[in-house]
């Protein structure tokens, strides 16, 4: 059929509406929403465009209307369309519909960019049929969005626009808010289609409920033929002209890893076991093309009638085994390491470090000296097991969370095998941080935003664009070619992720030994034995050394003094009111901070080796909370009455997991101490939901968190004031030592478990004993090293 | 967005006066503006909807508000030696909802909040949402919500009331 251009109108800088009538003046065939027409553009090949209809009924159309976007870097098809003059004729096919609208379900339409065109027709038809629908239109900016005003006028509240620069479309919410039984229709760029498919699947949608149309057709050539692809399972698929291997296999549910679909990122590299690929990418080197045993399956096709691909092979799937010992590049070993070059009193001098702790006192340098701080980051925070995050923060494959271990930025990510990995947050190319948002989902791989090097979620290098440029270079022999570096070791203990930066060192169980009983008790308080992070953490900065905070966790002689201003005032106010019942919540949470010395002595302190310990052995300031209806029943059901009692009778106050965290089992709170400098610490205070327990428990936990730990908390103000005054006071020349002698009876051993009077400073001494041990264990004495 | 009401000037004056009481540390006058059932809420999460099952900076009932004010003057309130000072710089308030018959109003006021002590000064961009209620002919605070524009940042002590 021949169409004649009757009218054109400009919609945005790059989008024009083109209106065609039949060249011979005859009536045009009708069509249903979702249909397209294919234009024949001579040498440029063919181009298909969706029909736009605003009437909702295109059975007898007067004209064929299209919205066409000029693709500057396209193959020239859209330019040719834009260049048509009114009155000019062009050959076209009859309308064809690969994207039909189902008739028996509510509909959610999602359009990205120029993918809006078929959606207008669909929305108009749905509107006319008075069916329930919602049209979401995502564009990069408002000025790049076409047809906004007419869509608002036509579809009213059923139309929602989203702009990337102001309020980016939140696909998860769009899909979560769909009406029951709704089908989703999406037309837009590949990334959007993939996002809808994966989020839809996660939200429990079946593939039949998701209808997709890509608005760009893959680069095709006149003489493309269909060919067959056989995969590992033995299944054979036919790839017709106009479709790519990835498209065909993905539609059949084969799980592949890919990104750009333009043949330049390198991620979809796949081993070829049989057949001759027709390479159309710009990634592979000449040698690789000639060898013919790998290909990029997004754009490349086949010269033979059949290709046999290894889609489970190393390139697509399997992780190349990472060498345990990364070999450094073969360069001349420098005679002086950078650290030694700037050596002060303590570097390479374990003797001097040991001398900072006498058993009853500790030298102020551990809090104020920059060199000590740097050594802590290098040794102590690398040799110990440090808390990273909770696995409920990364429930799905590709979910990640960024944080620090000591001063090292890391990413915690759920790998494709379901395990949680912890990687240094650094691109092996130029050092760019791979992720800077606090959390997100990266899909199957990380992609560096600078030059698109890509990495599997266990860090292994996946691809480098134009990788052939590195052939024969020294990159391959360096650790940079391995990808993002994982930390030394990772342990998921009942949902709590810990890591040790050093590749070799003490095992997790030996490091924590009996102290894990506190974590167990916190988790066991869930009738299902499971915790979930509840909301974002409080984050606050204290201008003091991180160890002051850690020590304060078991300092039972400060509350009745430092917190008199808050807890003491609360008690007084309440008395003045005549002790009304029920008690205001503040009385339950804050008033126990005024407990007298005898109470604190009776609480007891327990220490374990390697710096761990807790207050509240016999009872604690958390013992007297009111019972929450339904909770004990749920616990009894889960553990039996005796079991439930045993769990709930433990009311441990603060348990320190040296060096990085403190937990409160009865409150389900965790404080994470993140050092930012010798005199600066970031604290994150997280709370957890006890899965299967009544919400009132979480409400009390959230209340505790804000009353005690917020930057706006009165109790917090009391503490911060003390830490910061101490940090400043320590710089005076009056005295050099800090005292830890309370209930010290001479040289003590920290091997094994010990319970003591609750006002003892033994736990602080225990921490310094561990501090010395983990500071010096990897320190080469300078004198020996020189020999 | 501002809607029509007979009490327009009264509401605007009320909000400016409230801020001035805080800036001048006239806390007992300020407390008298509150209905005893009210809550002073400062959410932690951006666009937070639930004050109970997610952490907030503040969700203070009348007892907590009183405690906070009492504490500021305590003999052993070391974090207030010396005392902090603050300044609220208000934008023109929006009156988003008004029911003259029921005497209930909702206002939204953007402001800069400055807090200072010794050599440190903190500047916060905040939006205060007030639920106001006429009781015995005068406006009172039924509830107040203060959102920090940088709620997800790490903060030092914030000791007074934004
Ligand atoms: S810095 Fe990451 S790819 Fe270049
Ligand atoms: Fe304290």
Image (cartoon, helix red, strand yellow):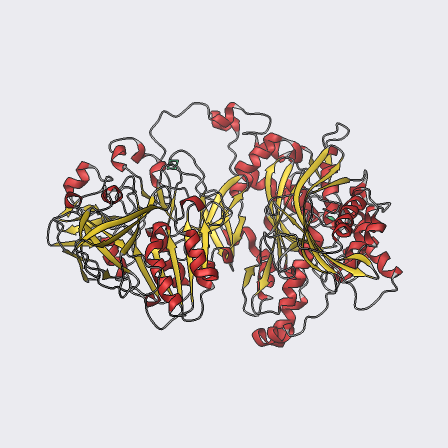
Residue B82 pos. (x, y %): 81, 38
Picture quadrant where residue A329 is located:
top left
Residue A491 pos. (x, y %): 48, 53
The answer to which of B83 and B31 lies nearer the viewer is B31
Q: Residue furthest front?
A: A25
The answer to which of A522 and B79 lies nearer the viewer is B79
Residue A740 at least partly seen: no
The answer to which of A20 and A668 lies nearer the viewer is A20
| Left-right relation of A6 to B119 | left
Q: How many numbered discs?
A: 0
Q: Report ligand 1 position as a quadrant.
A: top left
Residue A188 pos. (x, y %): 34, 53
Picture quadrant where residue A250 is located:
bottom left
Residue A779 at least partly seen: yes
The answer to which of A207 and A155 lies nearer the viewer is A155
| Left-right relation of A113 to A80 | right
| Left-right relation of A179 to B56 | left
Position of A512 relative to A367 (above/below): below
Residue B140 pos. (x, y %): 79, 57
């Amino acid at each position: 059929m021949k169409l004649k251009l009757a009218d054109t109108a400009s919609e945005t800088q790059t989008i024009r509406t083109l209106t065609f009538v039949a060249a011979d003046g005859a009536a045009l065939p009708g069509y249903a929403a979702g249909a397209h027409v294919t234009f024949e553009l001579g040498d440029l090949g063919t181009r298909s465009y969706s029909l736009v209809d605003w009437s909702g009924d295109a059975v007898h159309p007067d004209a064929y209307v299209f919205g066409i976007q000029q693709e500057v870097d396209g193959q020239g098809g859209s330019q040719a369309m834009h260049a048509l003059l009114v009155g000019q004729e062009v050959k076209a096919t009859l309308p064809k519909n690969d994207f039909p609208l189902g008739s028996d379900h509510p509909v959610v339409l999602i359009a990205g960019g120029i993918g809006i065109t078929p959606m207008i027709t669909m929305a108009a038809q749905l509107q006319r049929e008075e069916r329930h629908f919602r049209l979401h239109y995502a564009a990069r900016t408002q000025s790049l969005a076409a047809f906004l005003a007419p869509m608002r006028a036509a579809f009213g509240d059923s139309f929602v626009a989203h702009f990337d620069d102001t309020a980016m479309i939140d696909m998860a919410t769009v899909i979560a808010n769909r009406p029951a039984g709704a089908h989703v229709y999406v037309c837009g760029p590949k990334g959007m289609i993939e996002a809808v498919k994966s989020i839809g699947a996660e939200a429990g949608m079946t593939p039949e409920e998701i209808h997709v149309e890509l608005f760009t057709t893959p680069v095709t050539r006149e003489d493309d033929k269909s060919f067959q692809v056989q995969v590992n399972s033995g299944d054979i698929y036919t790839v017709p002209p106009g479709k790519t291997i990835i498209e065909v296999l993905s539609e059949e549910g084969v799980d592949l890893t890919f990104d750009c679909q333009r043949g330049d990122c390198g991620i979809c590299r796949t081993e070829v076991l049989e057949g001759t690929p027709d390479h159309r990418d710009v990634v592979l080197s000449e040698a690789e093309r000639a060898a013919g045993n790998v290909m990029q399956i997004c754009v490349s096709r086949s010269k033979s009638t059949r290709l046999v691909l290894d889609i489970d092979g190393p390139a697509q799937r399997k992780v190349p085994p990472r060498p345990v010992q990364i070999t450094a590049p073969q360069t001349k070993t420098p005679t002086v390491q950078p650290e030694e070059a700037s050596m002060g009193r303590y570097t390479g001098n374990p003797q001097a470090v040991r001398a900072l702790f006498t058993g009853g006192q500790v030298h102020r340098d551990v809090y104020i000296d920059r060199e000590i701080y740097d050594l802590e980051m290098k040794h102590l925070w690398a040799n110990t097991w440090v808390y990273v995050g909770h696995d409920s923060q990364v429930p799905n494959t590709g979910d990640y969370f960024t944080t620090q271990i000591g001063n090292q930025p890391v990413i915690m990510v759920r790998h494709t095998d379901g395990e949680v990995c912890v990687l240094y947050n650094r691109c092996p190319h130029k050092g760019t941080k791979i992720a800077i948002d606090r959390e997100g989902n990266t899909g199957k791989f990380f992609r560096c935003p600078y030059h698109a090097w890509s990495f599997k979620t266990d860090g292994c290098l996946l691809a480098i664009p134009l990788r052939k440029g590195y052939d024969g270079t020294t990159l391959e022999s360096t650790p940079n070619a391995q990808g993002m570096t994982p930390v030394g070791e990772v342990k998921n203990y009942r949902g709590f992720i810990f890591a040790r930066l050093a590749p070799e060192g003490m095992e997790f169980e030996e490091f924590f030994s009996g102290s894990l009983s506190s974590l167990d008790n916190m988790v066991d308080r869930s009738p299902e034995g499971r915790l979930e992070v509840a909301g974002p953490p409080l984050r606050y900065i204290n201008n003091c050394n991180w160890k002051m905070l850690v020590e304060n966790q078991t300092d039972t002689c400060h509350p009745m003094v430092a917190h008199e201003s808050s807890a003491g005032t609360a008690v007084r106010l309440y008395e003045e009111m005549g002790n009304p019942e029920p008690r205001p919540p503040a009385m339950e949470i804050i008033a126990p901070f005024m407990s007298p010395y005898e109470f604190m002595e009776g609480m007891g302190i327990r220490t374990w080796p390697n710096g761990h310990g807790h207050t509240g052995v016999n009872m604690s300031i958390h013992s007297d909370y009111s019972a929450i209806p339904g909770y004990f029943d749920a616990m009894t059901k889960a553990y039996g009455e005796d079991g439930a009692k045993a769990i709930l009778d433990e009311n441990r106050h603060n348990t320190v997991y040296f060096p990085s965290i403190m937990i409160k089992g009865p409150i389900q709170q965790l404080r994470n101490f993140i050092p930012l400098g010798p005199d600066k610490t970031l604290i994150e205070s997280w709370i957890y939901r006890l899965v299967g327990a009544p919400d009132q428990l979480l409400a009390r936990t959230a209340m505790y968190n804000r009353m005690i730990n917020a930057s706006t908390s009165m109790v917090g103000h009391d503490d911060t004031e003390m830490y910061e005054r101490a940090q400043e006071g320590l710089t005076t020349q009056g005295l050099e030592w800090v005292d830890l002698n309370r209930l010290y009876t001479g040289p003590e051993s920290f091997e094994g478990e010990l319970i003591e009077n609750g006002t003892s400073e033994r736990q602080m001494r225990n921490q310094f004993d561990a501090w010395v041990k983990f500071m010096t264990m990897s320190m080469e004495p300078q004198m020996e090293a020189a020999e | 967005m501002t809607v029509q009401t007979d009490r327009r000037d009264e509401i605007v004056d009320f909000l400016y006066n409230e801020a001035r009481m805080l800036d001048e540390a006239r806390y007992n006058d300020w407390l008298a503006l509150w209905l005893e059932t009210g809550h002073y809420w400062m959410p932690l999460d951006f666009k937070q909807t639930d004050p109970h099952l997610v952490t907030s900076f503040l969700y203070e009932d009348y007892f907590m508000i009183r405690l906070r004010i009492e504490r500021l003057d305590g003999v052993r309130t070391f974090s207030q030696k010396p005392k902090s000072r603050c300044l609220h710089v208000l934008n023109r308030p929006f009156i988003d909802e008004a029911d003259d018959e029921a005497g209930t109003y909702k206002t939204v006021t953007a402001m800069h909040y400055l807090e200072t002590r010794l050599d440190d000064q903190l500047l916060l961009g905040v939006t205060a949402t007030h639920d106001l209620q006429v009781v015995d002919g005068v406006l009172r605070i039924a509830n107040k919500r203060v959102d920090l524009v940088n709620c997800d940042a790490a903060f030092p002590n914030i000791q007074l009331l934004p």
